[in-house]
Structure formats: structure tokens, C-alpha cells
Image (cartoon, rainbow, N blue to C red):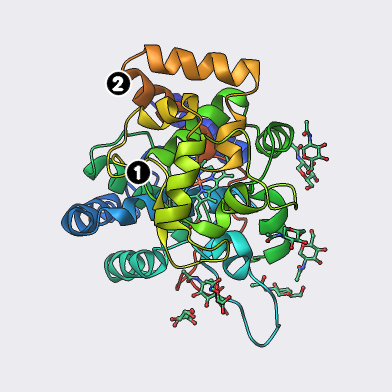
Amino acid sequence: MKGFCLVLVFVAILVSVRGDLQMGFYGSSCPKAEKIVQDYVNQHIPNAPSLAAALIRMHFHDCFVRGCDASILLNATSSSGNQTERVATPNRTVRGFDFIDTLKSLVEAECPGVVSCADILALAARDSIVITGGPSWKVPTGRRDGLLSNASEALSDIPAPTDNITILTQKFANKSLDLKDLVLLSGAHTIGISHCPSFSNRLYNFTGVGDRDPTLDSEYADNLRSRKCRTQNDNTTKVEMDPGSRKTFDLSYYSLLLKRRGLFESDSALTRNSNTLTYINQLLQGSVQNFFSEFATSMEKMGQIGVKTGSSGEIRRSCAVVNS
Ligand code: HEM
Ligand SMILES: *[C@@H]1O[C@H](CO)[C@@H](O)[C@H](O)[C@H]1NC(C)=O
Ligand SMILES: *[C@@H]1O[C@H](CO)[C@@H](O)[C@H](O)[C@H]1NC(C)=O
Ligand SMILES: *[C@@H]1O[C@H](CO)[C@@H](O)[C@H](O)[C@H]1NC(C)=O
Ligand SMILES: *[C@@H]1O[C@H](CO)[C@@H](O)[C@H](O)[C@H]1NC(C)=O
Ligand SMILES: *[C@@H]1O[C@H](CO)[C@@H](O)[C@H](O)[C@H]1NC(C)=O
Ligand SMILES: *[C@@H]1O[C@H](CO)[C@@H](O)[C@H](O)[C@H]1NC(C)=O
Ligand SMILES: *[C@@H]1O[C@H](CO)[C@@H](O)[C@H](O)[C@H]1NC(C)=O
Ligand SMILES: CC(=O)N[C@H]1CO[C@H](CO)[C@@H](O)[C@@H]1O
């Protein structure tokens, strides 16, 4: 028995040295944490399902900059004058900060200073997608919160809607994600909304001569111009990426891509690379359940990007500021 315990301790040390996350990391330090998150999500997301899209996007943006360490949640600090990720262009349309703050305060009330903001975000993103009928995936925990947030890194690491396949491939490879992950994770655009500036260059002035993007279905482009983005600079109108099905996590995003109706250049680009196109066709031939399980695998990879464990980072007391 003693030997067994020693082995356990040894394994535990190995695990922490390797910096892995683990299922139920808070099992003894805050056993109710995951349930508190799930209960609150289950209570509130059904009344505000569009937040599910906002939260999975926030988790993605968090993971792509300095790893999944809740750096996205940090407020700009006026004293240092730092431009944090939140103020960077890709973040301006990220929503859901208040929701995470509320979850954090509920969890803090149960066990102060134990559960990281990064884990709360990862759990809330998964639970909210599940409650809206989407896929589920494993969320091992033990992420710690970062001390830095940097707007220029958000600009360089988060893919832009105008990125071509070369740049998308590089930005994903930089996070140890491959082309298959790119196709699958882009599938999250089956839910949620965007704003005209993310794609209106395709409708009005694609190459700077008042032209359109020839790869966008012209009937769809006409509709977007006459009903949605009446001017190129409209930044208030909300536009669904998967019209008619924006609340349902399904394969219709991929069908639209093949009809040349992917909203962003980055979506459209997936159909002009032979590897990604093959993969899109395979997904469309498979079942929704198959898509869900493949999506889950990619989300589990995304949730591990650059995580801080052990003694790096900290457990933030308030998600918007580093502990003083
Ligand atoms: C492949 C590179 C990607 C690019 C270039 C990209 C770009 C964008 C853009 C421009 C928007 C709309 C922002 C706006 O105008 O309001 C958006 C929305 C969204 N993105 Fe992505 N995205 C990418 C990958 C992902 C990934 C990996 C996920 C999650 C796994 C994701 C989930 C979402 C969701 C759910 C929304 C809707 C948000 C809402 O309704 O508030 N995206 N994305
Ligand atoms: C962070 O910024 C938001 C929006 O500007 C503000 O509502 C919130 O009070 C700030 N939080 C902290 C802890 O400073
Ligand atoms: C702001 O910048 C200073 C100096 O580079 C750095 O020490 C500090 O940690 C930064 N704060 C955040 C929140 O990134
Ligand atoms: C933010 O990151 C950029 C690029 O890595 C770096 O040049 C800059 O000094 C960083 N800013 C802060 C405040 O740390
Ligand atoms: C992709 O975009 C980058 C940066 O805008 C550009 O340098 C490159 O030539 C583009 N590649 C292709 C194949 O269009
Ligand atoms: C990702 O990009 C950064 C600079 O932007 C670079 O320092 C780092 O080595 C890259 N990581 C990988 C895995 O390519
Ligand atoms: C299109 O873009 C070019 C270059 O940015 C600009 O000079 C031109 O005025 C724009 N045309 C229209 C119709 O907006
Ligand atoms: C929207 O556009 C207006 C006018 O160009 C500008 O003042 C405002 O800051 C923009 N809002 C966002 C969220 O970018
Ligand atoms: C949704 C959200 O909090 N967006 C923030 C992005 O950054 C600007 C500038 O700091 C804030 O005003 C927004 O509130």
C-alpha cells in the first residue's frame, strides 16, 4: 500500500511537471465549482442563447493569445496605459464579459481564490454550447490565469476574417492545430452573428476599385447589400453567418461554404484548398453526430493551448484585473 501511495505521489509530480490539465482538478479543493458553472449556465443561457456563441468565441480568442489564461478578460489599466487584448480590434465585438464576471463571483463565494477565470471560461463555453443543443467536449481543468494582456499580440495571433488559407494555416499551426482543426473549429460559425465591417469589403470594394469578391455568390452578395450592409461602414447591423440556422449547431455552415456563401474570406478560403475541401465533403457526407465528435476533439486541443499550470500565473480574484 505504501509503495502504491509512493507511486501515486510520483505520478502526481510527473503530471504537474508535464503541466497537464486534469479532469476534475477542483474535485477536492472546490468540489462544487463545475456544478455552479453548469447550473448558472443552464438557468440563464436558454433565455439568452446568443451568449453561447459569444462565449465559445471568447474562449477561442483567449486561447489564441498567450494560451488559455483568461488574458482576454483583463481590463486596460489606465495607470500603465497598456492596450490589453480587450481593446484590440478583434475583441471589440467579443461579448459575454459580464456573464463570466457573475460566474466568477458565484464560484468565489463558494471557494475564494481557488478556481481560475480561465477554467471558468472554458467550462462556461462548453456548458452553454451543450444547453443550446450543440456538441459536448471534455474540459480538463487546472489552468491558471495570466498576468499579461497585450493588444498587439491579439492582432497578430487571432485570425482575421480577411486571412487567406496560407495565413490561416500558419496561425493555427502556431498553436499546434492542423488543417483539420481549422475546418472543424471554423464550423463554430454555424452559430452566432457578425457585423458588416468583417466582410463588407467583399460587397463593395474588394480590390480597391469598387469591385466585389468574385468568389462570393452574387445573389447572396446582392441580398447582403440591399438588406443588411447598406453601406460598407455600417457597424451596427448584425448579420448571421449561417442564415436561417444561426441558433442551431449543425452542418449547414459547411453546405453554405460549397454554395459560395461563406460570409468571411476565411470561410470561403476553406473551399479552395484541396485538403480542406476534401475534409468539408467528408463532414457533409457524415452525420451531425460525427461532426460533433470531431469538433469535440479539436475543442479539446484548443483548450490546451499554452496553458499555465502548477505555479505559473495566478488564480485571479477578479477576472478583469491581475491580483495586486
Ligand atoms: C478560422 C479563423 C476564424 C476567423 C477568421 C474568425 C472570424 C470571426 C469574425 C470576423 C466574427 C464576427 C465578428 C463580428 O463582426 O462581430 C466571428 C464570429 C464568431 N466566431 Fe469566428 N473566426 C474564426 C474561428 C473561430 C473559431 C475557432 C471559433 C470557435 C471555436 C469561432 C467562433 C465564432 C462564433 C461563435 C462567432 C459568433 C460570435 C457572436 O455571435 O457573438 N470562430 N468570427
Ligand atoms: C472593467 O471594465 C468594464 C468596462 O469598461 C467595467 O464595467 C468594469 O467595472 C471594469 N472592472 C474592473 C474590475 O475594473
Ligand atoms: C502593462 O505593462 C507593464 C510594462 O510592460 C507590465 O509590467 C504589466 O504587467 C502590464 N500589465 C498588463 C495587464 O498586461
Ligand atoms: C506587446 O507585445 C509586443 C509584441 O510581442 C511587444 O513588442 C510589446 O512590447 C508588448 N507590450 C507590452 C506592454 O508588453
Ligand atoms: C496570403 O496573404 C498574405 C498576407 O496578406 C500574402 O502575403 C500572400 O501572398 C497571400 N497568399 C496567397 C496564396 O494569396
Ligand atoms: C508562434 O509565433 C511566435 C511569434 O509570433 C513564435 O515566437 C513562436 O515560435 C511560434 N510558435 C510556433 C509553435 O510556431
Ligand atoms: C475603394 O478603396 C480604394 C482604396 O482603399 C479607395 O481609394 C476608393 O475610394 C474605394 N472606393 C469606393 C467606391 O469606396
Ligand atoms: C462605429 O462607427 C462609428 C462611426 O464611424 C464610430 O464612431 C464607432 O466608434 C464605431 N463603433 C465601433 C464599435 O467600432
Ligand atoms: C465587449 C467589450 O467589453 N468590449 C470592450 C472592448 O474594448 C473597449 C475599449 O476598452 C471597451 O469599451 C469595450 O467595452
Q: Is residue 78 left or right of residue 167?
A: left
Tell me if residue 134 comes above or below residue 7 in the rendering.
below
| Precedes in sequence: disc 2 or disc 1 | 1
| Relative depth, front residue between 307 and 114 | 307
Residue at point 56% right, 54% down? 198
Foreground mark, 2 or 1, reads: 2
| Relative depth, front residue between 306 and 85 | 85
**Residue 59 in the image: x percent, y percent?**
47, 51
Task: Classify the position of the C terminus by image quarter.
Answer: bottom right
Q: Is residue 306 left or right of residue 186?
A: right
Residue at point 31% right, 43% down? 129
Residue indicated by mark 1: 126
Q: In the rendered image, is residue 144 in sight?
A: yes
Tell me if residue 81 comes above or below residue 178 in the rendering.
below
Q: Quadrant of ligand 7?
A: bottom right
Q: In the rendered image, is residue 68 in sight?
A: no
The answer to whether the residue labelled 2 contacts the one labelled 1, judged by CB atoms less than 8 Å apart, is no
**Residue 117 in the image: x percent, y percent?**
45, 60
Q: Is residue 201 left or right of residue 237?
A: right
Task: Classify the position of the N terminus by image quarter.
Answer: top left
Residue indicated by mark 2: 289
| Relative depth, front residue between 5 and 212 | 212
**Residue 275 in the image: x percent, y percent?**
62, 16
Q: Residues within 10 Å of mark 2 (few under 14, many from 20)?
A: few
Amino acid type, mark 2: Gln
